[in-house]
Image (cartoon, helix red, strand yellow):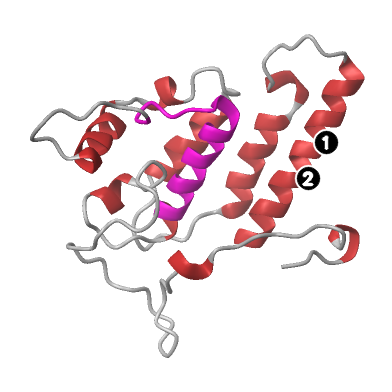
Amino acid sequence: MLGIGGLSNQVFLIDFGLSQLFRNPATHSHIVQTKGSSIIGTIHYSSVNCHLGLTPSQCDDLESLAYVIVYLVKGVLPWQGITVHPGQIHKDEVLRVKQATGVRTLCKSLPKPFVKFIKHIQCLGFRENPDYKYLHSILEECVAPQTLPNSQTDASSRRSQVSSAHRDLEVCLSSNS
């Protein structure tokens, strides 16, 4: 997809191969949560509910987004590179580590407001509509200069990085609302 207006010089890649409707197109009612679904996508970014075989919803998309952000910032997730012993199934071990990893451990070295972002997502129910404005405001807190980890770059460089990260997050969130 090509951006419009001030973003017309940017190309956005979207994979709709894994997307599915969460509302019935005729009635606009929310889909029913069922058990027995198989994992869709990469297990490292899949929500805990997807691991458990539950029908994914908007909250699961946000959980996956959180895992992607953590990965992009830290370069690794706690459940990547785990060793599977004979008789164990890799996806089950990934689920076990995900469930055992606390939010504070997952978010170690990330801006503190990101803990609030993940905790809010984890509290969302299957049929609940996420408050994207609230989630966006938390992410804005994360890229504010006072919440970024100390770096050896000068202040003007840091402001430029924050401004760029802020624009990227706004594009990401506005496309999801």
Per the image, label 2 sits on a secondary structure element best described as helix
Which residue lies at the image location 60% right of the left edge and 60% below the top edge? 176
Point out residue 3 in the picture as x, y percentages from the top left corner.
80, 64
Q: Give how far across and how far down residue 31 sits, in percent.
A: 33, 74
Q: Which residue is mark 1?
A: 163
- Look at label 2 and name its amino acid: Arg
Nearer to the camera, 154 or 58: 154
Q: Would you name the residue on which mark 2 appears?
A: 167
- Left or right of 10, for residue 174: left
Mark 1 Cα shell of 10 Å, populated few (<14), some (14-19), many (≥20) = some
Q: Which residues are magenta?
A: 60-80
Label 1 with label 2: CB-CB less than 8 Å: yes
- Answer left or right for 9 relative to 12: right
Residue at image point 83% right, 36% down: 163
How far apart marks 1 and 2 lie (CA) works out to: 6 Å
Element type at mark 1: helix
